[in-house]
Image: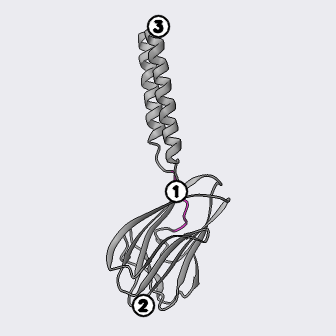
Amino acid sequence: MHKRMSAGIALLSLSVLTLTTSPATAQIITNGGFETGDFTGWTQTGNFGFTFVDGDPNTDLHAAWLGAFGTQGYLEQDIVTTPGQYYQLGFFLNNFGQPNSFEAAIDNLTTFSVVDMPDQPYAPYTIGFTATNASTNIKFGFYNNTDYFHLDDVSVTAVPEPGVLAFGALVGVSLLGLILRRRRL
């Protein structure tokens, strides 16, 4: 009986730990690292002069060079999402030159915007959002009048919301309490 309870407690603890630390699922952006050497999977609109894929990546071999001059250029992609599911958009961005402007939008709602970003090495950015439709538009807008932004490692992953994790931990602790209480009886 004691071994069975110990095994049950160990199994419960493992399931609570797994529930509360489950990793994000696979990313759903196409060609987020631009490793095809071009903009496969992306739609270019607006001013896309001086916008191309080349070296100087955050990781791997390629990055997007975003140097639209004077007016905004855009890179966008529609991704398959589940309404009500929480996601994280992640990307790495570096910059050389001012004046400039860079923004990220999710379903036409600007979620990140900066004007005259100082020169910086690659830095990570993460934006959380809850999908409202079966398709979600991810869009980057940019111009850089004297040099380039470099965009790399764009990803969108489905992740459990913090409330789901807290609920799972609460259920696990409650079950553990019940097992321990039964053990005392």
List the residue tagged with mark 1.
157
List the residue tagged with mark 3.
185
Q: Tell me residue 185's x, y (percent).
A: 46, 7
Amino acid marked by disc 3? Leu
Estimate the spatial distance between the alpha carbons at disc 1 and disc 2, rounded to whole Å.
32 Å
- Which numbered dot is residue 145? 2
Q: Tell me residue 117's x, y (percent).
A: 38, 79
Q: Is residue 26 magenta?
A: yes
CB within 8 Å, label 1 to label 2: no
Q: Is residue 162 magenta?
A: no
Q: Earlier in the sequence, mark 1 or mark 2?
A: 2
- Give the quarter of the image for residue 4: top left
Secondary element at image label 2: loop
Query: In this picture, which residue range is highlighted in magenta?
Result: 25-31
Q: Earlier in the sequence, mark 3 or mark 1?
A: 1
Q: Residue at x 46, y 69 (%)?
A: 33
CB within 8 Å, label 3 to label 2: no
Residue 137 in view, yes or no = yes
Of tags 3 and 1, the one toward the viewer is 3
Q: Outermost residue toward the right?
A: 134
Q: Residue at x 46, y 47 (%)?
A: 23
